[in-house]
Every structure is written in C-alpha cells, then in structure tokens.
Image: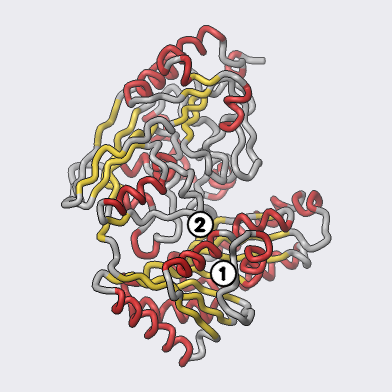
Amino acid sequence: MSDDDAPLPPHLIARFAAIVGERHALRAAQDISPYLTEPRGLFPGRSRLVLRPGSVDEVSQVLALASETGTPIVPQGGNTGLVGGQMPDQSGRQVVLSLSRLNRIREIDVASNTMIAEAGVVLEAAQQAADAADRLFPLSLASQGSCQIGGNLSSNAGGTGVLAYGNARELCLGVEVVLPTGEVFDDLRKLRKDNTGYDLKNLFVGAEGTLGVITAAVLKLFPRPKGREVAWVGLSSPRQALALFSDALERAGTGLTGFELCARLAVDFAVRHVPGTVRPLRDAHDWYVLVEISSGRSPDDARALIEDILSAGLDKGLAADAVIAESLAQADAFWRLREAMSEAQRAEGVSIKHDVSVPVAAIPDFIEEAGRAVHALEPGARLVTFGHMGDGNLHYNVSQPEGASGAAFKARYREVNDRVHEIVRAFNGSISAEHGIGQMKRDELVATAPPVATDLMRRVRAAFDPAGIMNPGKMV
C-alpha cells in the first residue's frame, strides 16, 4: 500500500477533530455509516472520519489543514446525489465534510427579493422561510425534504421549476466559498447586474465540490403567485405533447410554470407501488402531461388561462382527456404522482437510468429512436420515461423485462447506457441534465467531451486546488 492510499493516521485524525470538536468528529462505524451509502447504492465509500463543522471558520481551518497534509476532502450535503459525487472512495483516506450544521438562514430581504442561506439549509426549509415572508423560492425537487442548498448549488440542481425560473445557477446571485487553501471568498452580493470581471460564482455552482466548499449563498426570491392551477392531461404521443406545450407557452408565456411528460408505464408503476397515489383520469392513455399555470394577478386569471389551454388542446385533438385540480390538495396529489415515479421503479427490479436533455423540439424523435435502439438490444425492456418536457430534460429509464433475471439485465447496463447516450449526442443533447457528473459519468465525460473543454476544466481545477485535495475522482 502506498502512502497515498494509506488510511488516515491517528495523529492527523486528532488534529482535524480538534478543529470541529470531538462531538462533531465522527469516528465510530455506526456514526459514519449513513454518510457512506448513497440513494442508489452504486458507490459505497469508506472513511475513518466525518467532520461536521459549525462555522465558516472551522471549514476554513479544515481545508487549510487538508492542503497542508495532502488529505482528500469530500464535501457532502443531504447525501441525495444520484451520481456518487458526494461519496468517498474505498481507500479509507478521504475525509467526509458534512455541511449539515451550517443551517442558518442569515437574512431575508423582501425589498431585494433575496435570501442568504447557509449550505446546510434543507431545501424545504428554505421554501418555507420564503413562504413565511410572502415570497417564493421556486427550486423544487423530489428530495427537497432532505437535500441541502449547498448540494443543490454544487450540482446545479434542476427540478420541476426550471421552465419558468431556471435551475440552481440561475437562482443564485452570490456565494460564500472556502477555497482549498482555507481562504474565504466572500461574494454574498445581491446584485442582479454586475460586469466587473469574471463571474466567479458560476465556477463554483455546478463544480460538485471540486473547486471549493460553498458555505452560503444569496438566493433569488419571487412574489408568490396569486393564482395557481394544475391539470392532468391524457394524450396519445410525445408529438401531441410537444404541440400542446407549444400552444400552452404561446398562450401563457411566463405563466406556464410546469409541463411534465409521463409515459403510461411510469404512472402505472407509481399507482401500483407508492401508497396514496391515484390515477387522475378514469381511462388510461399512452402518455400524460401535468400542466401548471401560475398567475401574478388572481386565481380567476390562472383558472381562465388553464381552461383556455385545455379547451384549445381538446378542440385541436392534441389532448384526449383532461382534469383540472379542484383543490390545493388535489393539485398536490397530481404533483405527488409525478414525483413518485422514480421511487416506484425500485419495486419493479433493476432499472437502467438516464438523466438526459435534448432540444425541446427533438423530444418526440429522441423517444422514438431511443426506444427502437433499446428494444433492439433487449426486446422485453420496459421504457419508463418521464421528465421536464418544458426544458428538454427527460429521465429516460429502462426497467428489466418482466420475469427476467435482474442480474442479467444489470450486466447489460453499460451497453444500454452507451447506446442511449450515443443517441443523445446525435441530437446535440447532454448526458447529464440535472444530476451532475460525479463518479458515474466522469469517464464518459472525459471520453466524449471536446479535448479542449476537458483540458480547460483540468486547468481551472489545478489553479484552484494545487494540492489536489477537493473531491478527488469526481468530474474530471
């Protein structure tokens, strides 16, 4: 075993523990265990130490010591990431840095429509704090009850609100970051317009903790909609869904705040396996869309707009059936059905998942071509497609054939994954729309991105982290 691969020596563990305090330096196996397994169970890690700093100064001291000693640091938020970006490797030498204790909302500025939230603030808590101030923080994810703001920014999280409000990068005005050297970059400014030099904050947003540790951020808030309507629509094809989306966008403009596409099988799985989910429509349809309209004027305005969209869709033959939620509870139930689809797949066996994006206009053609390709490789595979059609992001998931061996299907993971991603690239799309690169897609990114792009990323990383301590083995 080389020195680089040797586990952390006790004297170094003691030095790190002295920074955060014994109580917050986790060493017992049962205490560390929750930090070493991620939701999919694909990237189990090993570590002898989890540090839980309670201040920016403590984060600074940890990183300064890590650079001095060449100790690899793996930042971790709510541990909800799906590509292994928050996981230590198997060496036992990497230290997990949990940001969960940095969980204060430092300020809400209603006049500026901003919030300053620390990295460990749970997304749902940020939403609730904005709501209490009569504002909206629109980042919305299925994991919002446990994911944290620092992780959301580090992975440039997307979710269901991207169509109207943008992803995490577009919701961030400024950041506070501890650099690998221990220096603190304080850029917690509320400016909407600033052309003074490079936009440094956007190097850290989406960097997956490879350039530094985000400890706080200035987040954009918005006026709460005065009216909100949600509808569930049955139709026959993604091509009809695209036409309905184009018509809805033409009629509603920025009032169209949600447009989710779901295959029939995704709905079937959710209703079958997730308690509390129900079918919004009596008859089954091959495809569904969830449409959300938000109005800054009034509830009546939102209602009239969604009725206009659905009436036109039915008249044009784009929609076969539709229902508008008659209460907030029913609207939430429609969204809960959509958000349950990923969870529901687990009960159906092995699933080969893809988080991809293509131009919105190409979605029907991509679904058709990818479906032909997958079935050529695995004729009985079940296609469980759902996602954020309004911004081109699909979760193109492939479940094992009924009655087939899960192990045999899992063995074909790389073959199926490579073929789907090949088609994505043919449509000038992205192999990672909102989940990030992490460990899962690192080698593919390096193999398929333009060499100049990967070289530039490596140069940026080396400039920020000359000691090479920040989240090794991730991104590039």
The answer to which of marks 1 and 2 sits earlier in the sequence is 1
Residue 177 pos. (x, y %):
33, 32
Q: Residue at x 49, y 39 (%)?
A: 78
Q: Is residue 68 above or below residue 214?
A: above
Task: Give the alpha-carbon distance from disc 1 to disc 2, as whole Å.
Answer: 20 Å
Q: How is the image coloured?
A: secondary structure
- Residue bearing the label numbered 1: 262
Q: Residue at x 56, y 81 (%)?
A: 235
Which residue occupies the extreme bottom position in the image? 315
Query: Amino acid under label 1?
Result: Cys
- Quick one: 169 or 199, which is closer to the camera? 169
**Helix, strand, or loop for circle 1?**
strand
Mark sitting on residue 430:
2
Q: Is residue 275 above or below residue 68?
A: below
Which quadrant of the figure contains the N terminus?
top right
Packing grade of label 2 (10 A; few <14, some 14-19, many >=20) is some
Q: Residue at x 26, y 56 (%)?
A: 134
Query: Amino acid under label 2?
Result: Ser
Could you tell me if the residues under marks 1 and 2 are in contact, i.e. CB atoms within 8 Å? Answer: no
Which residue occupies the extreme top position in the image? 11
Residue 460 pos. (x, y %):
39, 35
Judge whether residue 310 can be spotted in this image. Answer: yes
- Quick one: 344 or 92, which is closer to the camera? 344
Residue 396 pos. (x, y %):
60, 62
Please state if 352 lies on the left or on the right of 51 as rendered: right
**Helix, strand, or loop for circle 2?**
loop
Please state if 129 lies on the left or on the right of 27 as rendered: left
Which residue occupies the extreme left position in the image? 111
Judge depth for marks 1 and 2 and give the one in front.
1
Residue 43 pos. (x, y %):
63, 37
Judge whether residue 358 can be spotted in this image. Answer: no
